[in-house]
Image (cartoon, rainbow, N blue to C red):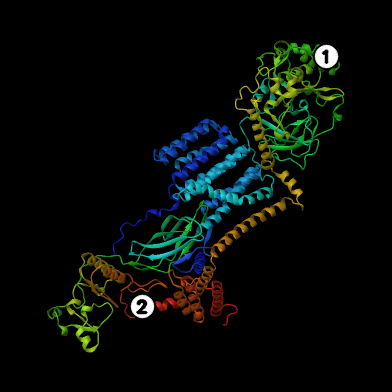
Amino acid sequence: MIKRLTNRNRSANAPETTELVSGRAMIWLIASFALLLVPQWDRLPVWLIASCIVLAGWRWLAQTGRLRLPGKWSRSGLMLVLVAIYIATVQGRFTVETASSFFVLAVGLKWLETRSVRDFYVLFFILVYLATVNFLFHQEIHWSVLNLAGVAMLFVGLQIVNAPDIPGAMKSGWRRLGMMLLKTLPIVVLLFVFFPRMAPLWSVPLVSGEARTGISDSMTPGDISSLAQSSERAFRVTFGGEAPPYRDRYWRGLILDRLEGDTWQQGSGRQFRRPGRVSVDGGRGELESGQYDVLMEPTDQTWAFALEGSEAVSDNVQPDDQGLFRFNRPADSPVRYRMALANEAQSDQVGGVPDNVQRYLQLPRSGNPRARAFAEELAAEFRRPGAVVQHLLDRFRQQEYFYTLRPPAMPDDGIDALLFDEKRGFCAHYAGAATFVLRAAGIPARVVVGYQGGDAGADDDYLIIRQYDAHAWVEAWLPGQGWVRVDPTAAIAPQRIESGLRDAMADEGSFLENEWTSPQRYGDMAALQWASLQLDLMNYHWQRWVVGYQGQSQMNLMSRLPGGIGLRELGYITAGLVGAGLLLAGLMTAWQYRRAESRDPFSRVVARWHRLCDRAGVPVRHGETPSQLASRLSRVMPEAAGTATAFARAVNRHYYGGESGTDSRGELARMKRLLTAMKRQADRQSPGRPGGNH
Amino acid sequence: MLKVIGDRWRHWVNRRVPRSDHRSFGQRNIFIMPTGAGVVFGFLLLIMLITGINYQNSLIYLLTFLLGAVVVAAMHQTHRNLSGLELTLIQAGEGFAGEVVPFRLRAASPRHDTLALSLACDEVVLHQQHIPSGQQADLNLLVPAYQRGYLQPDRILVETRFPFGLFRAWSWLRPLSAGIVYPGPLAAPEVASTVQDGEEQAKSRSIDGNDHADIRPWREGDMSQRVQWKRYARTGEMVITDWEGEQGSPQWLDYDAFAGVERELRLGYLAHQVLERSRSNSRFGLNLPGQVIEPDTGAGHASRCIKALAVFGLEQPEGGGPLPTGTRAVGGAGHSRHASGEGAL
């Protein structure tokens, strides 16, 4: 019986924070890291991705005991090397890419020193924020699902960290998390709808160093034909009424009016970039007939695309002096804006010459002599600018000009070569050449860059304009008519304008020839097209109702509800929702507690008696019989001796009596009466209570 | 100031969590606060919200609200994990000072699983106890004992951070029953017993020398062989002969043998002697001021002796468990114990 305890058995006494993380928790952390890295894939340098994989793999091998974690020195060395590579490759640029690279590098290095629970939490916080950052770059529904899955894995990992040795931890972890999400879903949805979408508190533009696919602010022949190899989405348009026919879908983006060498540029110089962010949500109420909503993918540029003769409806786009539209900041996230088709009215500009006429007649001092001579010939022959334009288009239409994605190289005097020798080119070649000839003939002209066309999405709800719809054409100033659209491509390859690039390139077979994975490449596979369009539709609604649910959409929705709900009211509603949610959750818990306690009415009465005893200063001891408790109680409260003894006897009778035929309801009522009497006696006895006899 | 607040808080908690060997945890006595990680996560949510506002990013709003809701749900889950747990001290153990005393607790969770429960007393922690719904588990909490006497842990901390470690729900069990801590055994220097072990007694020693023996009334614990049955038959008095020779013999372990030695030290010496005798299976008795344990052998006897040493001169803590059995309380200490137990209420 007496022996000295020599082994103290204090094995489990280490403080929790230094406890080692179990392998099963670690694998969830690593899996989540891998998943959350996928959206960053295209913006991270290859060496970083490779080292992250190596570091995380090392960590895993160390966890399974096949490898050792590096010591302090080799860890520092490794860290120095990787940071040095980072600094060397970044070279002082500060962009979103370099920032997120650094972030990922920090996580990658952290793997090697993740031993304790505290380290696990540090990684958990960083990875949750990584998921947040991912949302800045990718907002499509599949990316969102992936991000949320990554975060969910983190929470499963946390559960395993906190209870490493329960059986079936993974399954129960997912179930528990799922139940939590399910139960809180209504409040999340309400918060999402009602949380006031404030203006940005301060502006941190997303400066990206990576070129986005899309049209740029200068054009060298051949630029747009490389765009034609991309089936990425440029923007989507929803029309309030009928969409205009295909051939009239000219989406003007920007004007290039200055020719330097063989590159067309914007003449007016770069616009001053104002600080602040572009408002991403310009929707206003119902879409009326004659209006259209454009949901534009981020371009990192300020220009907005609009049909000819449009007016801005939403206030996040402003018209400029060339009849184009601008955001006041580069669009670094998807932007929705609304335009209206105006009735043909360019009256104020129709007079003699446009403002800054010299700007639209500018040509390099030398080069392309044959084109210049040809232009002078035309000018001498026709006199009337309209007739010059007509003749030029006729020439394109009648002679053997080809529209091709595989134009030959035309290094010297490219316009001469195109017009008189090769006669093969893409829209950018022809637009540039035509503008050159018109200017040389003394007609103000400019190159317009944008998109032409657009295919219907699923259910014909909206048009999808993709990068391969990029187009360049010409606008010429004709007296009495103002700026008139002149599209040489329409003369050379009418299919391009009537039904798009795919048909125009049908013979050549060069449509998306390098884009093996694009569903658009396989236009003849109906099922694939259907699936691709359905996915796009899903994303469209996702973008429209969830991602794009910002200031204006919220106000629209609120204006449909009774009562003028402004931002302030939304704030109150949000606070109320949070409060009500917390209250409701609390009440539910309390109710569950009561319900569980009250399953058996007898035990509830006994529990009340125990509470009474507790209050009276007679704590219930374990294993004590009711009679013992009653006798102790009566020693403290002699007044209640009789009732207590009677009550104890009733309890005994109920639980240990054995006669099943007794009137249990009557018994219960009697016990309740006794309890009430006991309470009264207790109240009477305890001094200082209001209503007592003292 | 802080101390005052601390005392107030402790007082308030003690009122809410009265001493009892049995406690079922519920809303009345569970406390919940975010952990350090929980606070950091709160800040992270705030930063996420600001990111969402600044970049007008609805999906970041959505993620923030989703995780915020998960935090609230986790708070309830953590609370629920502890609520409904029933904890009972089924045995307060015994052990030597400077070592640990095992406290056996029975945990039952009738309604739902209680996972990743930890029990702590002083700096000893029992991690990761899982009590599945409707089952019982016996937990062994080793409470460090620093000094001999009754060991009644002021509070046994019962806490859980499940599921995410963002919140910590805790409560206390304040046991009524006390464990017993034996004095830490110390090897005593060679000293002779002072109890009448003189030369003059030695020569008068005889087998049936009734005249030389002290006669005293029977007390509980006396062996029946020593009862003077003849005298009992004659007078009806039950008397005992205390053999002078025996009493002065080295088989008595005597508190008074270590004159001038400090009390705790003496008890340590005695504990050592008890262990020694017990090991060599020799016969011995224990003489403490106000308490005498007659010579005997065996584990039960040794246990009785060492318990007597453990609680020597100490009052049973309020409402404590039963005294170690078989001791002979002198001077009505046993009665005063009960009186004080009730009177303090």
Cα distance in 3D space between marks 2 and 1: 130 Å
Q: Nearer the viewer, mark 2 or mark 1?
A: 2
Crowd rating for badge 2 (residues with CA inside 10 Å; few <14, some 14–19, many 20+)? some
- Taking A188 as reference, is B175 left or right? left
Judging from the image, mark 1 belongs to the subunit labelled A
| Residue that appears at 66% across and 25% down | A523
Q: Nearer the viewer, residue A259 or A383?
A: A383
- Taking A315 as reference, is B48 left or right? left
2 and 1 marks on the same chain:
no
Q: Name the residue beneath numbered marker 2.
A: B334
In the current view of this chain or complex, which residue is farthest to the front?
A: A661
Type of amino acid at the residue the image marks with label 1: Ala
**Percent coordinates x, y for residue A677 in the rendering:** 56, 78
Residue A379: assigned label: 1
Contact (Cβ within 8 Å) of mark 2 with mark 1: no
Type of amino acid at the residue the image marks with label 2: Gly
Q: Quadrant of residue A282?
A: top right
In the current view of this chain or complex, which residue is farthest to the bottom?
A: B235
**Mark 1 residue element:** helix
**Percent coordinates x, y for residue B169 in the rendering:** 51, 58
Please determine whether, in this image, residue A594 is positioned above or below residue A244. Answer: below
Q: Quadrant of residue B221?
A: bottom left
**Percent coordinates x, y for residue B101 in the rendering:** 36, 63
| Residue that appears at 55% across and 31% down | A91
Please determine whether, in this image, residue A395 is positioned above or below residue A265. Answer: above
In the current view of this chain or complex, which residue is farthest to the left?
A: B203
Judging from the image, mark 2 belongs to the subunit labelled B
**Percent coordinates x, y for residue A114 in the rendering:** 46, 43
Camera sees residue A92:
no
